[in-house]
Image (spheres, rainbow, N blue to C red):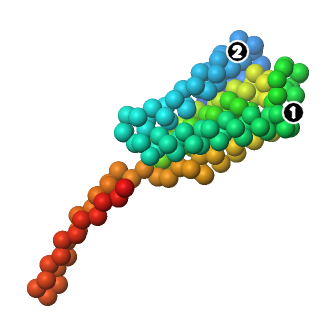
């Protein structure tokens, strides 16, 4: 496990250094495009996982957190009315791309565990980076998007319980008990 974390960390640092090696416009356009693709892909993956697993409760939890996230993000953009860097149009605070991707990533982590959550968070973090690299947001916008995205998920999402039933058996001094528990 320790070897995997060291290797994963080394790869992540290499990836981040690759994207911070200068301010090439073609590179920034590619980074921005990847962030735009992740805006759709991460939430769709989170919702799609509930469909594939037949996780109706998770689907409702995702839907509630998604709607809260969109409402908070839009509301804060209207109330705060912070302009984007270099007056590139629109309202900046909080970053909608970042809040959406972190909402998807935190749902995956919260519902299905860190095994799936870590890669999702790395992709969400890259989306936040892409917004700064494209001069669409500053660090505060991205940080606020992260907080709104993760916070909206943690209000509604519970861990997925794969085992919905439990069979128990106990014996003591000549008596035997068989139990059956089912979790709804």
User: Along the horizontal axis of the image, is 112 left or right of 74?
Assistant: left
Q: Nearer the viewer, residue 144 or 182?
A: 182
Quadrant for the C terminus in the image: bottom left
| Residue 95, quarter of picture | top right
Q: Which residue, given by chain and number where applicable, does mark 1 sit on? A: 81
User: Along the horizontal axis of the image, is 77 left or right of 119?
Assistant: right
Query: Is 148 located above or below residue 180 in the figure?
Result: above
Query: Is 108 located above or below residue 123 in the figure?
Result: below
Foreground disc of the pair 1, 2: 1
Residue at image position (85%, 38%) is: 79
Residue 117 can be seen, yes or no? no
Residue 63 x %, y %: 54, 39
The dot on residue 29 is 2
Query: Is 125 located above or below residue 180 in the figure?
Result: above
Q: Nearer the viewer, residue 50 or 63?
A: 63
Residue at image position (84%, 19%) is: 88
Q: Secondary structure at mark 1?
A: loop
């Amino acid at each position: 496990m320790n070897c995997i974390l060291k290797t994963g960390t080394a790869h992540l640092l290499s990836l981040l250094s690759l994207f911070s090696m200068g301010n090439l416009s073609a590179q920034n356009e590619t980074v921005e495009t990847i962030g735009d693709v992740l805006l759709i892909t991460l939430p769709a993956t989170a919702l799609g996982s509930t469909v594939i697993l037949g996780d109706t409760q998770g689907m409702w939890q995702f839907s509630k957190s998604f709607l809260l996230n969109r409402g908070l993000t839009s509301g804060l953009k209207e109330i705060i009315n912070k302009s984007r860097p270099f007056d590139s149009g629109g309202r900046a605070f909080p970053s909608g791309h970042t809040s959406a991707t972190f909402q998807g990533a935190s749902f995956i982590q919260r519902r299905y565990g860190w095994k799936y959550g870590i890669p999702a968070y790395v992709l969400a973090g890259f989306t936040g980076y892409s917004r700064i690299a494209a001069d669409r947001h500053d660090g505060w916008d991205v940080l606020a998007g992260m907080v709104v995205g993760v916070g909206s998920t943690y209000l509604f999402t519970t861990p997925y319980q794969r085992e919905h039933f439990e069979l128990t058996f106990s014996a003591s001094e000549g008596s035997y008990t068989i139990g059956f528990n089912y979790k709804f």
